[in-house]
Image: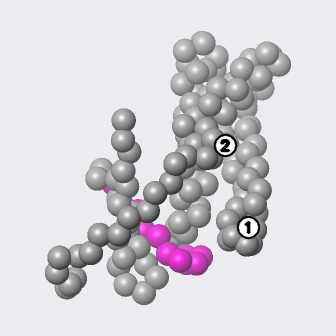
Amino acid sequence: METSVFVRHEGNLSFTVSNGRAEAGTEWGAVEGRWMATELFLSGLGACMLATLVDYARNQGIDVDGARVDVTAESATRPVRFGAVRVVYTLPPGLTQPQIDALVRAGNRCKVHQTIENHPEFTVRVDLMREPPG
C-alpha cells in the first residue's frame, strides 16, 4: 500500500500539506498558529505509536483511555537532522507490568517508528512544471 502527501509552496516560507482528505499549514521556522515541518514529523511518529498501542489494547481488552505519547527531539548538525528522539508513554494507572511491556512493544511496532529504525530506500526525483504558476 502506497501512502502519499503533497506539499505546496504558498509564498515566502509558507507551505500547505495535504493528504487529499485534509490540509495543514506549515512554515519554515516557528510562526504562531502554524506547524513546522519537523513538528509534523514528530507528531506523525507520536500519533502512529499511540494509535498502534491503542489498537493493540482494544484487541486485548486493556483500558488505556487517556493514554498519551510525548515526543521530543534534539537537533544535530552535519548533516542537519534530529540527533536524538525521545518518546514518553503516559498510561493510565492500574496496569500490570506485563501489560505495560506489551503495550510499549505494540506502540514501538508502528510503521513510522519501524521506518525510522530500519532506514527505508530513499529516492528523489525532479519533475518540471509544464507552465509557470500563477
Give the residue displayed 53% in from the left and 77% down from the top. Answer: 28
On the picture, is 69 further left or further right than 15?
right
Circle on res. 117? 2
Work out which quarter of the rendered image holds the C terminus and state it: bottom left
* 12 horizontally vs 132: left or right: right
| Magenta stretch: includes residue 134 | no
Q: Label 2 vs label 1: CA separation?
A: 17 Å
Please identify the quarter of the rendering in which residue 81 is found. bottom right
Q: Which residue is mark 1?
A: 75
How packed mark 1 is, by other alpha carbons closer than 10 Å (few <14, some 14-19, many 20 or more), is few
Residue segment shown in magenta: 22-32
Which of the numbered marks, if any, corresponds to residue 12?
Answer: none
- Amino acid tagged 1: Ser
Q: Nearer the viewer, residue 57 or 1?
A: 1
Quadrant of residue 14 in the image?
bottom left
Above or below residue 101? Residue 125 is below
Mark yes or no: residue 124 visible.
yes
Residue at the image position 42 percent from the left and 68 percent from the top: 25
